[in-house]
Every structure is written in structure tokens, then in C-alpha cells.
Image: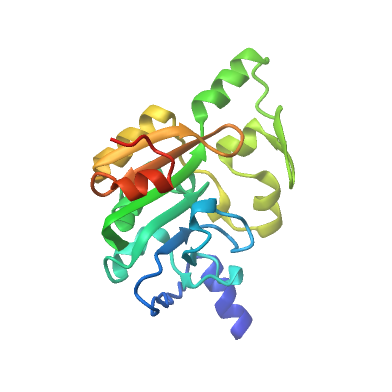
Amino acid sequence: MILLNVMKNILGRNEVQRAPEVSGDGETPRVLNVGGGSKKIPISSWYQDWSHLLLDIDPLTGADVVLDARKLTTLPSGLFDAIYCSHNLEHYYQHDVLNVLAGFLHVLKPDGFAEIHVPDMLLVMQHCVENGGDIHGILYESAAGPISVHDIMYGWGKQLADSGVDFYAHKTGFTPKSLREVLLAAGFAEVWINASTSDFAIGALAFKQQPSSAQRMLLNLPLE
């Protein structure tokens, strides 16, 4: 029965919600890692002294919060100083992206921000055109093995095959322009777009209000 309940959860038919543990000294900033898969996967170095909580739809990740990110608004508001979301936003259909971002805004403190990384579909399409248009052509070698154009567009094929569940599939895509536009449409006050730390990817920093001098220094943004 336990195994059956776990499998129902993974398949999205019997979702378990576990509320985040946010008690503490009230001074240590908190970052919510949305869809990160594992706390063993490094996040940006500026969070090294922060309290790091993981949210994931898959309970087998050991997440602090087991929840579909489209339901973030069911959590209490203003819990986190930052959201870290790396290669997860593309796993939602286009019409659900604003729901996910609304959840980000909901759980962020008034001066909070979101750090988002997604595949750069503009770079991927340019690469295809310039290199013969092979959708199964290899874009780059990752630590987990070769990554193809098809992997970037539709989701990592090996992970999909091994897991047997479709929440690892990619359901939408972004260019620098479209990512900026959807973040502003969601209600973020200021958005910075730049190159990501990974191959063929975009990085974004989106703020609920204008970033403070301390945030600009922390995130290596120009000082006003």
C-alpha cells in the first residue's frame, strides 16, 4: 500500500503536500529551490549561507515541500527571500507558466527575487540552422552524457525513458525576449536577463520591487 501511494504521487493522481519548515532565528535568509531534484545539485554560490529548502513534485527526491509548483499559492505567503528555479519552468505548458510565476510572487517576501534558468531556444534554433538542422544532433556533453537538440526541445530522453513519467518532458520554451516579457507580465517589477551558467541557457533575475543596494552587490548587478 505504501508503494502504491508513492507511485500515485509520482503520477500526479494523489499529490501529497508537505508544508515547508521555516522556523529558525528569523534572520537567516531562505531560498526555495523549485524543481531542483536534489539538494546535492549545486545552486548559485550567493546562497551558501542561506537556509535552502527544496520543492519538488516527486517525493522520492526527499524534498522539504512535495508539491506541484502550479499550486504554490496554497502555501502561506511571504515565506522566502528568494526563489531558485533552474531548468524547471520549461516543464509546464505555456498557459501554466503565469500560474507558476504567480506562486513565486506569492511565497516571496515583498523585497524578494527569483533566479530562473531555462534553455535558450533562440540559440538552439540558430545552432540547428547553422549545422544542418539535425534534431538529434549533439549540442554539448554534460556530466550525465550527451545532450541533443531533441533533449533541449522536448526533455532529456534518458530521464524520460528511465523514469516512465511525463513531468520530466519539456512543454514550452523561451527566448531571452519571451522570458523577460512573461516575468514582467506576471508582475515582477524589474527583470535582468543574461547568459546562464549552463550551455544553451538563459539566466534571469526577477525582483518584486526595485533591487536594493545590498541585493545588487550580492548578485553582481550594477549599482545605481
Observer able to see residue 107: yes
Q: Position of residue 134 (x, y in %)?
A: 68, 22
Name the image quarter holding the N terminus. Answer: bottom right
Picture layout, residue 28 above or below residue 177:
below
Residue for point 49% across, 57% down:
47
Query: Quarter of the image holding residue 127?
Result: top right
**Residue 4 spot, x, y in % from top left:** 60, 79
Q: Nearest the camera: 151 or 52? A: 52
Vertical position of residue 28 compared to residue 168: above or below: below
> Is 26 or 169 nearer to us in this picture?
26
Q: Quadrant of residue 108?
A: bottom left
Q: How is the image coloured?
A: rainbow
User: Percent from the top left, x then y, of residue 166?
Assistant: 56, 54
Q: Residue at x 51, y 29 (%)?
A: 121
Q: Is 223 left or right of 209, judged from the image as shown?
A: right
Pinpoint residue 38: horizontal percent, then vertical percent: 60, 63
72, 107: nearer the viewer: 107
Left or right of residue 172, residue 157 in this image? right
Left or right: 177, with 135 as reference point = left
> Which residue, as the protein is rendered here, is positioned at the far bottom?
1
